[in-house]
Amino acid sequence: MTLSWTQIARLGLVQLCLGAVVVLTTSTLNRLMSVELALPAMLSGGLVALHSFVQISRPSWGFWSDAQGNRTRFIIGGMGVLSFGAALASLMVALGAAGQGWGLAVSVLAYVLIGLGAGASGTSLLALLASGCAPQRRAAAATITWLMMIFGIAVTSGVIGALLDPYSGQRLMVIVAVVTLGAVGLTAAAVHGIEARVIPARLPEDTPLRQGLAEVWSEPRTRTFTLFIFLSMTAFFLQELILEPYAGLVFAFTPGQSTSLSGAQHGGMFVGMLAVGIAVSGLRLGTLKLWVTAGCLGSALSLAAIAALGQTQLGLLTPAVTVLGVFNGMFAIASIGAMMQLAGQGRSGREGTRMGVWGASQAIAQGLGGFAGAALVDLLRLSGDTADAFGLVFALEAGLFLAAGLMAWRIIDGGRLRPAASLVPGE
């Protein structure tokens, strides 16, 4: 049996919960630490980066869900750990202790738990989708689950923002309790019974973790796709922390206009994701290879245009960022679809481990990309014009996307990944 559309939508609710809890820690608490507690932005940024780097543990979670033959346990358990970490981090903010002594130590522990929980739950969920989806439904499944995650992020941000005024620590903890307990409860209800009906029961394995990871890493297609994920996701996240400052410093956007610019980008991503899902799974238009490559190359051209606008001062930044969002969405969904397609190729019963390896590559790229983009802009502004500094970073990002697109075109063959030997000239 394979996952029905209803079951895919139920698993999408888990992604919605993941997005809702994670955005609470990366956005709401980040703002409260920086503004209400007047802590250095580096502190809150470091905690957010910590939760990304902790997700290098994703291959381990994927392997254990493969070996034990029970992904449901890891999905629900990971959501519980994530929610506990979010509640603990929120408590430190509510008490005003997040930036000093024992409160800082507890906050570090909380963000480690957030990274571990998100890695365990998210990796096992993707592995369940990859192993349970019919091949022709994988692009649509990726679209459904990611759109629901974005919906969870958007709704949670908006609702929490409205309910937090006027701010108090008690009000924060009531909201956090509702979000986290609701996420665990909804996850348990959404995933209940799906794995038992779709995936044949497997006996637990006694393969050691190191051997299991080595077996998957020895597969040329896994290593090649890991490099592609790292390269493309570094490009994807380079602009994450500099786009709104670029709008404010170079184009004199107000804070409200900058926020609207970010909304336009996410709206474009929503359109791009939806378009690929409908085209591939509904209309049978194009292949994942084509959409991944088009998304990368389109993102590169959009970033080149955004860099050029800073030199010409044309008032077209919002349309250009919207188009960037569309191509980013196309690339993201097609890449996830290809990832789900490729997770089942190679040694059987290792979908979770492969998803974990690729998830770890993405998490490292996210942490490095966001930090590197901001650091490069600061460094270049010391010795040059502000518009030039931002423009050079956007141009670098465009170059990375161009390289990722060319790599995708060479290594993805329809729904399959070419073995590494085929990439060697003359073979």
Image: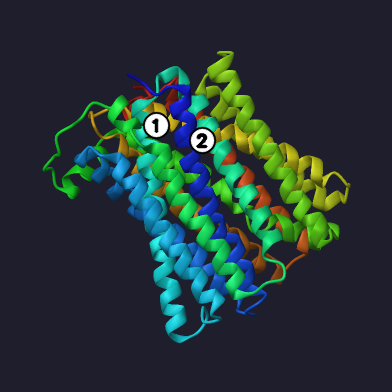
Residue depicted at x 41% and y 40%:
189
Residue 28 position (above or below residue 215): below
Seen as rendered, the residue at the extreme bottom is 101
State which tag comes first along the sequence, 1 or 2.
Answer: 1
Q: Report the number of discs.
A: 2
State the residue in front, 352 or 28.
28
> In this rendering, does residue 301 appear at all?
no
Q: Is residue 364 found left or right of 30 in the rendered image?
A: left
- Observer-nearest of 15 and 294: 15
Question: Residue shown at 36%/21% (left/top)?
Answer: 2
From the image, which quarter does the C terminus lie in?
A: top left
Does 162 sit above or below residue 71?
A: below
Q: Position of residue 115 (x, y in %)?
A: 41, 58
Image quarter of residue 41: bottom right
Task: Name the residue type under label 2.
Answer: Thr
Which residue has dot 2 on it?
145
Question: In which image quadrant can residue 353 be found?
Answer: top left
**Residue to which mark 1 is pinned:** 129
Proximity of marks 1 and 2: CB atoms separated by less than 8 Å: yes
Q: Position of residue 56 (x, y in %)?
A: 36, 54
Residue lying farthest top? 284
